[in-house]
Image (cartoon, grey):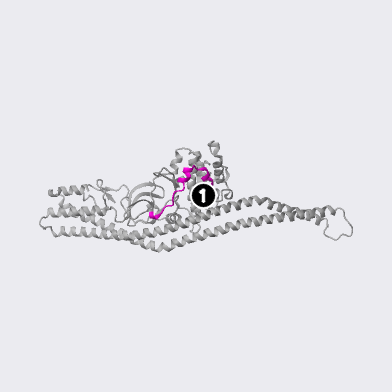
Amino acid sequence: MRVCPRCNLKYPDENDRCFIDRMALVDAPDERVGTILSGRYLIESPLGEGGMATVYRARHTLVDRPMAVKIMNRELAGDAALRERFRREAKNAAALAHPNIIEIYDYGETDDGSAFLAMELLDGSVLTVLIERGPMPPLQVAAIGLQIAQGLARAHDFNVIHRDLKPDNVFVCRRADQGLLVKLLDFGIARSMHDSRLTNAGEIFGTPQYMAPERVTSIDAGPSADLYALGVILFEMLTGQLPFQANDIPGYLIKHLQDAPPRPSEIVPQCPRRLEELILSLLAKRPEERPVDAHQVIKELSALAPREGRDSAVPPQPSSAGRQVAPTLPPTTLERWAKRAALFDEMARRAFPGADAPAGVTQMLGGIHGMLRRIQQLRSEGLVHQRRLEAMEANVRDGRERLGNAVEVLAQDLSRAREAARSARSEVQGYFEADAQAADGYRHAHARLESLGGYRQLAEPREDLVPALRATVDTLERWVLTRTASEKARRWIDAKTNEVTDLEFQVQALRGQLERLEAAHGQEREALERVLTGHGTEAERIEQQLLQEATRFCTPLRQRRELGDLFAQLEGG
């Protein structure tokens, strides 16, 4: 793609001069800028580039909405696994519908086969930038950590594990009210229990500095692995450094597996004890020694965060109704072309007074106006379809939010039930151990009595059997007592476990409702998006034809002095 350095109008590669101001065209610094994806996402400027994708500022041409578009780098377009990561990121993040998770609007492919995501445009910076400024106050650590935990809780409630939680994937937004709003990004390698895996045996996805020990040895690591990564992030925010230092990837993995983390208070003496204990529990080597789930972390951080931090950490649920559809077509290139066409008409009237314009000129003007009418028709029809799509998405999002809130309420009960079950198992462990010891004592006494022949009828009394018989009876009585206590404890544990199982069943039922909600609207959504893409692609093709026809019209007239002021208006517009 080529661009005019003065008016920024975009041209195909075969053009060499701008028809408006006759400037020599130059190659666009980024060929994506100025292009339209899926017939409606206009790429405006690059925002950032990574190893896998580039993020651009973009605008929805039908509803005039600013947004961000993430496009997979062209050289990776043939990688099926990376394309699946983009699809998964769109599916996972869109279904979760939570204020602490970035909102994904759409997923598709460019003309060259590169996958892209259309998502909300955020204003702020990734958490990495804040950490690089130095250690943060404990209250700020708790406030940011609270929102990260809230986003994780929603993901885990719907069986989605992030698997690459790190400061680069945590965005801290700037807001007019100065309150914090944290967004989790990049669910590209997240694993849902319902998705096929992107990893094979022996493969490791993620960032070694934040990787839980079980992630090193198994691809089946669960939600607790995300909690471990959160512990690393909290440690890093608080102290300004990672809990483990190494020179290479194997070094980090070994330290996560073997080394105990330092106590944060050794680095930051003013660290609150409760925050330190939370961080250390999150960094426990064994998953079962960490908090039972993200809801337990939320409970702890809510107590640690300042009140204003807690208030801003729970922003109101976003609503699709807040993303209003424009009542009419927003300002687009169509309006600029309409003004240019009016200038072309005036040029023809001046250059050929008395309706003496050559047939070729009249034909070109008719073609230009015909193309403008067709673009207007395509954009108007597209807006109707976009309104239908937005209305459908609003209903789906409302459904997601209702189900998400219902799951959250149940998940909080489930969290308490899990914690109660864990505490109960810890409390009664002594009864089970005593029962096992009593059983061992009886078996030992029984074996001793048996070795002395004490189970045969005696012809004569034997004094050496008396202690053995007494010991066997004593140990049996002890075993009866401990077994009674352990059975009672086991019934208590079973009741706690059944409560967890029942709540898990209810949560799973709500997850199923979400899947059915998504599936019910899937075909209608795809049909509308196909129409929008088709209309947008045709409109873009016609605009390219307009460029060629306008160039043909203007070139022979540019030397006419009586048209100088009109060409000046054309250049000024």
Secondary structure type for disc 1: helix
Which region of the structure is painted magenta? 295-321
Residue at image mark 1: 226
Residue 64: give x, y in percent of width and height.
Answer: 32, 52
Depicted 234 relative to depicted 359: above or below: above
Q: How many marks?
A: 1
Q: Residues within 10 Å of mark 1 (few under 14, many from 20)?
A: many
Residue 484: give x, y in percent of width and height.
Answer: 71, 56
**Residue 10 vs residue 217: left or right?**
left
Query: Which residue is the extreme one toward the left?
Result: 354
**Residue 280 vs residue 539: left or right?**
right
Residue 299 located within the stretch drawn in magenta: yes
Q: What's the residue at 46%, 57% (across, down)? A: 402
Residues 107 and 429: in front is 429
Q: Please say whether residue 153 is visible from this viewpoint.
A: yes
Three-letter amino acid code at the position of disc 1 = Asp
Residues 90 and 24: in front is 90
Q: What's the residue at 14%, 60% (across, down)? A: 359
Depicted 255 relative to depicted 374: above or below: above
Residue 551 located within the stretch drawn in magenta: no
**Residue 219 vs residue 480: left or right?**
left
Q: Please say whether residue 529 is visible from this viewpoint.
A: no
Q: What's the residue at 50%, 48% (across, down)? A: 149
Assign the magenta stretch its main secondary structure.
helix
Query: Which residue is the extreme one toward the right?
Result: 460
